[in-house]
Image: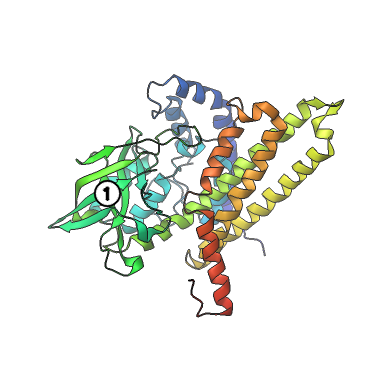
Amino acid sequence: MSPQFSDRGLETQEQVKSFMDDFIYPNEAEYYEQYAALDDPNGTPQIMGKLKAAARERGLWNLFIPHLDPDAPGTKLSNLDYAPISEQLGKATFASEAMNSSAPDTGNMEVLNLYASDRVRERWLAPLLEGEIRSAFSMTEPDVASSDASNIELLIEKDGNEYVLNGKKWFSSNALRPECEVLIVMGKNDPTASRHRQQSMIVVPRNTPGISVGRDPMVFGYHDRGGHPELVYDNVRVPEDHILGGAGEGFAISQARLGPGRIHHCMRSIGVAERALDLMVQRSLQRHTFGKAVAQQSLIQDWIAESRIEIDMARQYVLHVAYLMDSEGNKAAAQEISGIKVAIPNMALKVIDRAIQVHGAAGVTQFTPLAHMWAHMRTLRIADGPDEVHKMTIARREIRKHDPSFRSA
């Protein structure tokens, strides 16, 4: 049986589509023109204020946290109802921000809502929900393979009524935004504990003394607004009540955080693939080779058909996982979450690559969105855990169905 959207979910999906048609697509050119004119590449185009106001006026605000306090601003939807909205937001890079539903803020708000102390929640969650500030998630490290969380080296050590942080992170996306005022940092608080009890997450105000910026990596030559900077933590001190969920809970919190985030990533990726397919078809109708439209070439028709099939299959896969998360919980859907994280970016890359090929030389330039789409999708095969880690997890679960005692070498 196919998952069924709620009436509220269906209504909101239509409202989001209308918002995209009325505000996002018509303002894309102006958004990028304003961004290009900024002195600070991490700044915000002025038009974003107008878009946020319009989204909030239409009630399209904070749509992503199903269990948030009903008095908080926004309309909270289930994972299933929110999934098609993520797909729409994936069709324009700045649409998520306009509705206060962009990463890494979504995951950070989720974590603050579930695990922060009352004081920390009031100080940081409230302004994030209002869209007054931005945040960053500081987990990946440059010197170790941090897709294995047990490798993380940043230390979080107790000293009286404070925690002291020492170490280095990078790909702390958003941390260079002027509006970024708070970080969630994952580090190691007890190297002697069991493997999944060594890590903790802690809330760190961005302006805390001891935080400095190192390198700012580009991604396939692109600079993303807010950057992915290297952050050095040198005797950074924060109050003890800034620890999230308690010492040693970092690994469990990271799994809870990444489940919904992967749904959002995957559905936005489907939106990217849909837009790439649209661009491919439009281009194939406009260009002629060997005496006929490119769309009349049988190979191009095959690419279009394959893309349509792959996108529709991918969408059903993700909607199924969203339904499982809502009905059985994130833990019960862990294998399926890993599955979509592998399948969807790879599918989107195939579609984008075909669209680039149909565009010819233009496809690899800045004059279409395709090259940037490809760079983002290729990065997503590493972000939130590389393909190989998710495949390893899936394989182990399958093997243990036949041999519960199985252990990897």
What count of labels does the image hold? 1
Relative to the observer, which residue lies in front, 66 or 148?
A: 148
Say which amino acid is labelled 1: Gly
| Residue 337 seen | no
Q: Residues within 10 Å of mark 1 (few under 14, many from 20)?
A: some
Q: Work out which quarter of the rendered image holds the N terminus and state it.
A: bottom right
Q: Is residue 394 left or right of residue 211?
A: right
When the figure is inspected, residue 255 is found, relative to residue 130, above or below; the finding is: below
Q: Is residue 368 left or right of residue 177?
A: right
Q: Quadrant of residue 243?
A: bottom left
When the figure is inspected, residue 55 is found, relative to residue 47, above or below; the finding is: below
| Residue 365 seen | yes
When the figure is inspected, residue 197 is found, relative to residue 208, above or below; the finding is: below
The residue under the point 41% across, 45% down is 104
Residue 214, x across and y down, in percent: 31, 37
Q: Secondary structure at mark 1?
A: strand
Residue labelled with disc 1:
167
Residue 6, x across and y down, in percent: 57, 56
